[in-house]
Amino acid sequence: MSSLWLTGCGGGSSSQSNQIVKGASITKQAKVVVSPGSGLVRGETYTYVSLQGEDGQTYVPLTLDAAFQKDGLRVQFTATVDSTEAPADGQAGIYVTLTSIKTL
């Protein structure tokens, strides 16, 4: 099983408490980041949408309702970690399936 270790600056003694693994449920506060026109698939331009967590990590929702696809929107979300492996499409981050999301 792949895992991603998040390490912070400062005097922590172990990063194991920050481990994010596939299938884990997480709740985070984040800012929505919209990057329009950043790729081309089958001749169509698409938009990357990610959630920049207050923990510095980028989360990539597999689906996100259009009402939340506003650059700079602050949200709180709960999600299941789908993958911590490097994505084939080039968008870096932890892929998640959202179970709830709300604006702050």
Image (cartoon, rainbow, N blue to C red):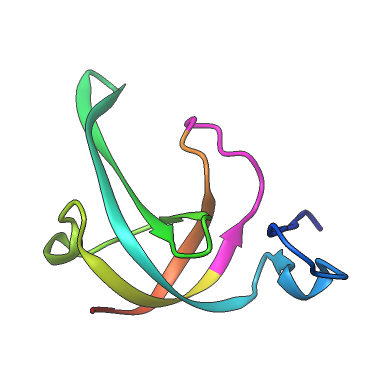
Residues in magenta? Answer: 81-90
Q: Is residue 34 magenta?
A: no
- In which quarter of the view is residue 20 placed? bottom right
Report the front residue among 62 and 94: 94
Q: Is residue 32 left or right of residue 44?
A: right
Q: Is residue 86 left or right of residue 42?
A: right
- Residue located farthest toward the front when viewing the structure as drawn: 11
Q: Is residue 58 left or right of residue 7?
A: left
The x and y percentages for residue 76 are 34, 77
- Residue located farthest toward the top when viewing the structure as drawn: 43
- In which quarter of the view is residue 30 placed? bottom left
Q: Is residue 86 magenta?
A: yes
Tell me the residue at 64%/75% (across/down).
24
The x and y percentages for residue 15 are 81, 66
- In which quarter of the view is residue 2 placed? bottom right
Q: Is residue 40 above or below residue 59?
A: above
Tell me the residue at 52%/47% (across/down).
93
